[in-house]
Image (cartoon, rainbow, N blue to C red):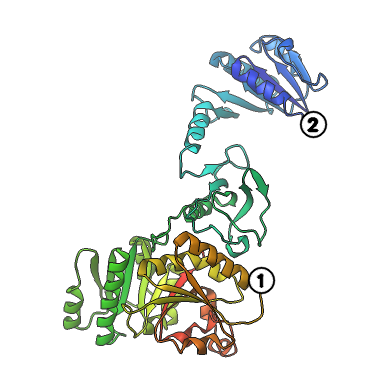
Amino acid sequence: MKKILIVSDGAIGNHFIEGVIGTHTTENVYYVISPKDTDGYSGYNPSRFKFFNFDPTSYYKISNILKTDFTQAILAMENQTELRQTISNIRALKPNIRIIALDLWNSKSQDDGVEWINMRQILSLNLIDRLPNIPVLAQNIGLGNGEIMEVLVPFGSSFVYRHIGSIEQNNWKIAAIYRNRQLIIPSDQKMIQPNDILVLIGEPSVLKSVYRAIKRELGQFPAPFGSKLYLYIDMAHEKAHSISELVRRSVYIQRKLKKPLLIKIVNPSSVEILRMIKSYATKGVEIEILYKISMDDDFILNDIKKHHIGLFIVSQSMFARTSIREKLYEGNVPVLKLANRSFSQLQQALVILGDDNHVEHISTTVFDVASQLGFNLELIDYTIEERENITQSIEHFSNLSTIFSKSITVVKTEDNPIRFLREYDNFLQCLPFTRKMFQSPLKRLFATDPEILYMKLDNYHQLFIPTQI
């Protein structure tokens, strides 16, 4: 049984005492020093509440109460001078007791050993919590540093209609879901609905990123990854004709997405090709040239951060280089690998459904890209037997199609999907950008996972989308 001292001299303190009476806990005993007469309170248990009416600034009077062994003291007083004197009295008699005091004057001292509750800060935080699109942070739970957050999921969120199990939760977790004023305990099979309230726990810096991902607006690709497109050209490894096609296709994509494009040229070797590239330098297209670089340089990662890159464009041959893929994976940015096929004539984007739930990680981005570029969207289901994860993925895509007002086609085939898709003339394959793409050639030889075998469709355009938030 813990004994707690409460000192109150005003309306706020009286409300606090009434609130404590209403908690109905049996674990604490409260000694209340208050000018309000005991008869003013009702509904309390006399065995748990002991009331005293005297001036707490009186050292003699309060010393008699402090002969009791208190766990902590809570002071809710509206007279600053009397509050300071009461703290001094308590400290003189109980130097190690935990003191929590209400600060109405924003005048707390950092070295007095008192835990101050700043009234102005509490009021401002409560007002901020009422603003739209502002995360609600737990102030009096845990550390109060933002490790507990409440987020409303808007109708057009990238989290809508996703299964909990498909959301990679590193250094954060969905702790609870509130729907229609009812608590739902999360499980892998639970699906997030529009207007759900999610309670998140995790590292404060990670939760800020999660909040932005949840609140992300659809139809804004390459957001939330970034705001610019980036075409990487290494003239030491690219042929002149390939460079010309890369630039032309990238400028076409830039005009379709209506986002700035940065063309980064390294190891320049041809004045004629440079002139050709510079001829595309218009509003929205910027060109930078970098001399004498090696693959050990971190300029790619630095550029991704510096320029807020949201889509990295490379050639088929450049993406085949492991060193380039490693840096792009580390950069956590979508990568569009352009093949030697027309891009302006593309009419469809497709996703191969695999055993993992990785496709749900990228689904919103896939819809976003397909909608903005005007592509039809196909899901390739290459097994005839029913699998729960495949059924969930198709359900997820079907729900998203309602949000985007864009229909999808599910193609079922018993054939090897790689062999099946090679019969297609042209398409954009969308797939998760995972560590699977760094498997050794020997492991790839016996693999059946389409994510590992992405190189088998290397002659088609491919969009690699990160699964990390």
- Rounded to the nearest angstrom, the CA distance separating label 1 from label 2 is 48 Å
Residue at the far right: name it: 47
Name the quadrant containing residue 381.
Answer: bottom right
| 341 w.r.t. 81: above or below | below
Q: Residues within 10 Å of mark 2 (few under 14, many from 20)?
A: few
Q: Quadrant of the N terminus?
A: top right
- The answer to which of 385 and 157 lies nearer the viewer is 385
Q: Callout 2, which amino acid?
A: Glu
Residue depicted at 54% across the width and 81% down the height: 450
Sequence-earlier tag: 1 or 2: 2
- The answer to which of 469 and 375 lies nearer the viewer is 375
Q: Is residue 317 left or right of residue 288?
A: right
Q: Is residue 422 left or right of residue 271?
A: right
- Rendering coords of residue 393 (x, y %): 58, 69
- Rendering coords of residue 52 (x, y %): 73, 12
| 111 w.r.t. 294: above or below | above
Residue depicted at 63% across the width and 27% down the height: 100
Q: Callout 1, which amino acid?
A: Glu
Q: Secondary structure at mark 2?
A: loop
Q: Is residue 130 left or right of residue 267?
A: right
Name the quadrant containing residue 444.
Answer: bottom right
- The answer to which of 59 and 195 lies nearer the viewer is 195
Q: Nearer the viewer, mark 1 or mark 2?
A: 1
Q: Is residue 365 left or right of residue 13?
A: left
- Residue identifier under label 1: 388
Number of labels in the image equals 2
Residue depicted at 66% across the width and 62% down the height: 189
Residue 235 in sight from this viewpoint: no
Residue 336 in sight from this viewpoint: yes
Q: Residues within 10 Å of mark 1 (few under 14, many from 20)?
A: few
- Rendering coords of residue 86 (x, y %): 63, 16
- Residue identifier under label 2: 27
